[in-house]
Amino acid sequence: QKEVEQNSGPLSVPEGAIASLNCTYSDRGSQSFFWYRQYSGKSPELIMFIYSNGDKEDGRFTAQLNKASQYVSLLIRDSQPSDSATYLCAVRGSGGSNYKLTFGKGTLLTVNP
Amino acid sequence: DTGVSQNPRHKITKRGQNVTFRCDPISEHNRLYWYRQTLGQGPEFLTYFQNEAQLEKSRLLSDRFSAERPKGSFSTLEIQRTEQGDSAMYLCASSLVLEGYTFGSGTRLTVV
């Protein structure tokens, strides 16, 4: 059973702070990692993906990957109230299941004005 | 609209009834996925189509569930003899090759 674990939250940060979201995964063969944002009652929206070890930045978002530690994180700088949502970590399967994404349960982030 | 379209958005049905959901993927996407999401959980994989071929069906899908994708275009997910445990958000997604998915708005099913 391939698993993806996220810190359960909820995570509450003040506006303008850095929010840090973490994820670990069990499938050592996984090569692709995704962060989705999901507002309450809505469907997931892709915000970042990362394939290589290290950092990947896109605007206020930075994804970090450490394959040796099987760890993925998402940093949100200058957090805004509009960032309040559930953040889902997803890992693409390896080998014959490389079309399948396994999701964590998500971390609920609240950014307080 | 070039996104993934799902219909209906909401469905309330009585236990034991059959329901069918439709998904229209992004037109150039050859891969189509169905996921189910319950409250407080991440989406769980149900089934996968590459073009018109259904390549995997999760053990989560009992014999009451069937999915089709005729001609590799839209897809339908049918649930027969619905049970209260089927209440969930049913998400359709599509992708081109192995990039990240684009999800539709989902169909929220409530079985009463």
Image (cartoon, coloured by chain):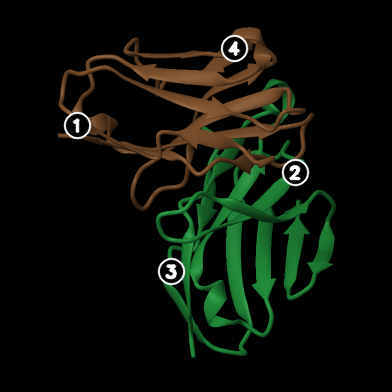
* Marks 1 and 3 in Cβ contact (< 8 Å): no
Q: Which mark is residue A9?
A: 3
Work out whether residue B83 or residue A5 is closer to the camera in this orientation and state it: B83
* Marks 1 and 4 in Cβ contact (< 8 Å): no
Q: Earlier in the sequence, mark 1 or mark 4?
A: 4
Question: Mark 2 is on which residue type?
Answer: Ser
Q: Which residue is mark 2?
A: A32
**The C terminus of chain B appears in which quarter of the rendering?**
top left
Q: Which residue is mark 1?
A: B84
Q: Chain of mark 3?
A: A
Which residue shows up at 28% across the image and 14% down it?
Answer: B80
Work out whether residue A64 or residue A69 is closer to the camera in this orientation and state it: A64
Q: CA distance from mark 1 to mark 2?
A: 35 Å
Instruction: Say which of marks 1 and 3 sits in front.
Output: 1
Q: CA distance from mark 2 to mark 4?
A: 23 Å
SS state under label 4: strand
* Marks 3 and 4 in Cβ contact (< 8 Å): no
Are tags 1 and 2 found on a single chain? no
- Which chain identifier belongs to the brown chain? B
Q: Which residue is mark 4?
A: B54
Q: Is residue B74 left or right of residue B63?
A: right
Question: Mark 4 is on which residue type?
Answer: Gln
SS state under label 3: loop
